[in-house]
Image (cartoon, helix red, strand yellow):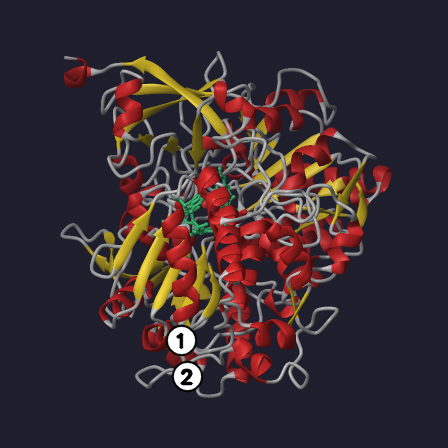
Amino acid sequence: MHLFATHFGTYEVAEDAHGKPRLLPFRHDPAPSEMGLGYLALADHLQRVRAPMIRRSWLESGPLAGTGRWRGNDEFVTVSWDKAANLVADEVRRVSSIHGNQAIFGGSYGWASAGRFHHAQSQLKRLLNLAGGFTSSVNTYSYGAAGVLLPHVLGADYKDACDTSPSWNDIADHCDLLVAFGGFRLTNTQVEAGGTGSHRAAEWLKRCQEQGTEIVIFSPAASDAPAGKNVRHIPLRPNTDAAVMLGMCHTLLVHGLLDRSFLTRCTVGFSELETYLTGKIDGVAKDAAWASSISGVPMDAIVAIAKNLNHQPSLINVAWSLQRAQFGEQPFWTAIALACMAGHVGKAGCGFAFGLTAVNSVGQPVRRLKGPAFDQGHNPVRQYIPVARITELLENPGGTMDYDGRVLTLPDIRLIWWAGGNPFHHHQDLNRLRQAFQRPETIIVSEPMWTATAQMADIVLPSALPFERDDIAASSRDNWLVYSRRVVQPPNGILSDHEFYGLVADRLGFRSEFDGGLYIDEWLVKIYDGYRDRYPELPDFPSFQDRGFAALDEGADAPAPADHFRRFANDPRSAPLKTPSGRIEIGSEAIAAFGYDDMPGHPVWMPPAEWLGAPLAKKHGLHLLSPQPAHRLHGQLELGPASQSAKRHGAEQFSLSSADAARLGLRDGDLCEIYNDRGRLVAALAVDTGLMPGVIVLPTGSRYSPDAEGVDQGGNPNTLTDIAPASTLSQATAPNSCLVSVRLWKRIGREAA
Ligand SMILES: Nc1nc2c(c(=O)[nH]1)N[C@H]1C(S)=C(S)[C@@H](COP(=O)(O)OP(=O)(O)OC[C@H]3O[C@@H](n4cnc5c(=O)[nH]c(N)nc54)[C@H](O)[C@@H]3O)O[C@H]1N2
Ligand SMILES: Nc1nc2c(c(=O)[nH]1)N[C@H]1C(S)=C(S)[C@@H](COP(=O)(O)OP(=O)(O)OC[C@H]3O[C@@H](n4cnc5c(=O)[nH]c(N)nc54)[C@H](O)[C@@H]3O)O[C@H]1N2
Ligand SMILES: [Mo]
């Protein structure tokens, strides 16, 4: 079968009536995503980068900061691949020999493509490692706060976003009450990093409902609650979930509904939390009334749900979005404490989970596919940043930054090379990032499309699109392997990242180390055989290539992953966690010892600088949430038909409650200006009757396109968000703490009448 693999699933390649290739849903996928069906439209899109391009002032004046016209505001000159390879190799050599390799930032965060061989960062990192290394980045935008907190609380084994949840079949069979903070935004389940052959998360959630699991969803948006039976939605103010959970903890405490034996056997630090809950030190009891006044959730709902968490076999799920906020560690830590108090941790399908439905894989009862990726080699440079500190890195060379008990020194970055990511989509406060991007001497971007990031480069290296090359797609959290076969040839001799980096490696004198003396098809066999060494039941490469896919445990009942905490809960001594105490750390001496003001040694609720109760809310009274877009993957496929047809009057759509729309004199379809002290953007209003007043929702991924006045006509929420971190501990991204105002920009057409 001829298949094409993407992060949003697998597609079959067929021909239309004119013999042109077109994509069809994969026949083995029960819920294929529509997102990718129009992918081939990018092949000859006008916004495609068609040749290596150099910014004119850089080409004419050389790599000196502040020369000529500004980045992002200059014209580009086409050069040959040979010339581009010479310029790039010379620049890498110049910067590393004069300033040292730590002056090269190769962190390159981003989702790139699903194929494992052509994975852009891996290709770039292998090249830069051979050239002496680069300043790198750690952690993710997805899970940055939790990924640093959880090793302290649960141990290093639970650092990964997808590994805490019990499996869906156990939830359906054993959990009577599922309380979710941050909802089930089911459009997110279309996606899995590295791809999948089978979208099943929504089906599993439905099965839970049908088998009688009662579901309670705390979210500002009613649309976060799934349709169907046994669902109750409770609105709450954004960023107040930890307060609601603490109110529940307090309820359990005062009603004596605690699993004391579990707390004693399996946790440490509960007494610190207890002191905080009762208000012994600050005089404030964190009771249901306190939580209600902060969150807007009725007090009796908090009390009743807390009691049920204890009475019924229950599971608490927290959406990843909650930790993409200031103090975003807290709802995660508090949920663990609450689940330990309520007493079902370690029972099948119960306890706590993070990110059910965030992506397809969380909770899937499938065997994980662990295999070799394209080898990046070794980076001799020790300097790194937590990934969301890119602006500070550029603004503050030589400065220091506290992070997870360490003090990092920020190197002086002279050269940035980005491949497979789009910081001018994903980072916060893009106007500030734009200033910071003026600092380095040279910026290189490898990118198939003219993204906002490509526009900011000095050297733009086009890359073949994923359907223009052969690859193997596989996700370490999924049981599918797909042979992704080229659909069309890249136009104008456009090279893949690997092919171009080979030219650069040649000029730097390490070509054979870079490509290992292998052609691309030989690399694919090598990677596949690496999987087969682990899973001998996989077919041989020619059969796999011919059939187009392989799935572990196909047709059989997949083995459910072991319930991680069950062995620990049964006997914490024989199966300790990898925390300092070997137990769940409801209080952490290690974190307390760091002495960070914004990160005490036990779960707390603290008011973020931007939320509906903040002083700033008097000026900018709407809380902006920027969830994942339904019709594209971040900025990828923004130019595809699904994303473009979801625009209104050509603008990105945002939502507001009917009460707020009426109060502001705005009508459905109005083009509006959303603004705060960091930026201004234009987007089209879609009134959402299920949204809580005071909240505004603008998904990510629309292209940042500031006009001459600096107003982002593309409607990217990161024009408005702040770079302030979740906390000093994690230094993670926190875009979901952001206050804005809205006013009419322009009323158009029928809607104006
Ligand atoms: N406000 C706000 N901001 C957020 C978030 C939020 O919730 N709110 N979420 C954050 C999260 S969780 C994430 S993961 C990030 C995602 O941010 P990114 O991962 O940076 O977003 P993508 O659009 O997936 O960027 C991938 C880029 O790689 C390019 N690409 C694809 N294939 C190839 C290839 O083979 N070679 C090369 N050279 N390039 C290729 C694509 O064209 C695309 O431009 O955004 C973060 N930003
Ligand atoms: N279609 C599509 N799917 C995707 C992606 C994509 O770009 N497109 N991106 C993927 C990636 S990289 C990631 S990391 C995951 C992210 O997965 P998540 O982090 O779970 O997703 P979000 O869409 O950011 O947020 C989910 C919901 O959280 C709610 N929410 C936000 N803030 C709060 C709060 O303070 N309290 C409560 N109770 N609720 C809140 C919002 O209403 C939102 O609908 O999604 C993945 N799935
Ligand atoms: Mo993400």
Residue drawn at point x = 34 percent, y = 85 percent:
557
Q: Is residue 230 above or below residue 312?
A: above
Nearer the observer, 263 or 116 = 263
**Spatial CA span between label 1 and label 2:** 7 Å
- Between disc 1 and disc 2, whose residue precedes? 1
Q: Which mark is residue 523?
A: none
Spot occupied by residue 67 in the image (x, y as percentages of width and height): 70, 17
Nearer the observer, 116 or 676 = 676
| Tag 2: amino acid | Pro
Spot occupied by residue 683 in the image (x, y as percentages of width and height): 35, 25
Camera sees residue 509: no
Q: Is residue 642 left or right of residue 299?
A: left
Mark 1 near mark 2, Cβ–Cβ under 8 Å?
A: yes
Spot occupied by residue 347 in the image (x, y as percentages of width and height): 46, 78
Residue drawn at point x = 64 percent, y = 51 percent:
276
Q: Which residue is mark 1?
A: 365
Quadrant where the C terminus lies?
Answer: top left
Q: Which mark is residue 559?
A: 2
